[in-house]
Amino acid sequence: MTVELSGKTSIADYMVIASGQSTRQVGAMADHIFRKLKATGLTGIVAEGQSNSDWVLIDAGDVIVHLFRPEVRSFYNLEKLWSHAELDAELDGEPDMTVRVA
């Protein structure tokens, strides 16, 4: 799932949320994404959570990637958190947050 954040928050322009079926798969996905980002010449990439790989966060500046095991993704439910942010923004008269499913 891709959440467009530009104009809504200063933390990033996009947030990507994805799942792997095991800690090994989540770790491999994180390693692959980290290496691909580095290969583009991007600097300052930070990865957190690779030691247990239940939830890995990769901060690539304008894009934040969250990789979860399904149970952990369900527990934290970031999709719901951001849908509430969208509702709060609508109630405050601010622009809507666009959530795009990739």
Image (cartoon, helix red, strand yellow):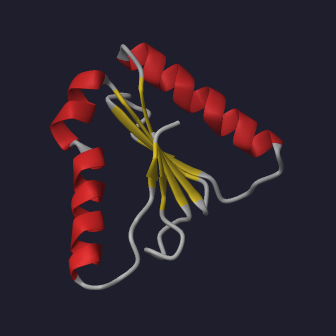
Which one is in front, 98 or 53? 98
Residue plotted at (53% across, 36% down): 102
Above or below residue 58? Residue 36 is: above
Residue plotted at (46% across, 16% down): 25
Residue plotted at (64% across, 38% down): 34
> In the picture provided, is 10 more to the left or to the right than 63?
left
Above or below residue 12? Residue 57 is: above
Which one is in front, 89 or 81? 89
**The image quarter in which residue 48 lies:** top left
Residue plotted at (59% across, 29% down): 31
> In the picture provided, is 83 more to the left or to the right than 51?
left
> In the picture provided, is 49 more to the left or to the right than 35?
left
Above or below residue 17? Residue 69 is: above
**The image quarter in which residue 68 lies:** top left
Looking at the rendered image, the quarter that the N terminus falls into is: top left
| Horizontal and vertical percent position of residue 98 | 44, 59
| Horizontal and vertical percent position of residue 27 | 48, 24
Q: Residue furthest left?
A: 75
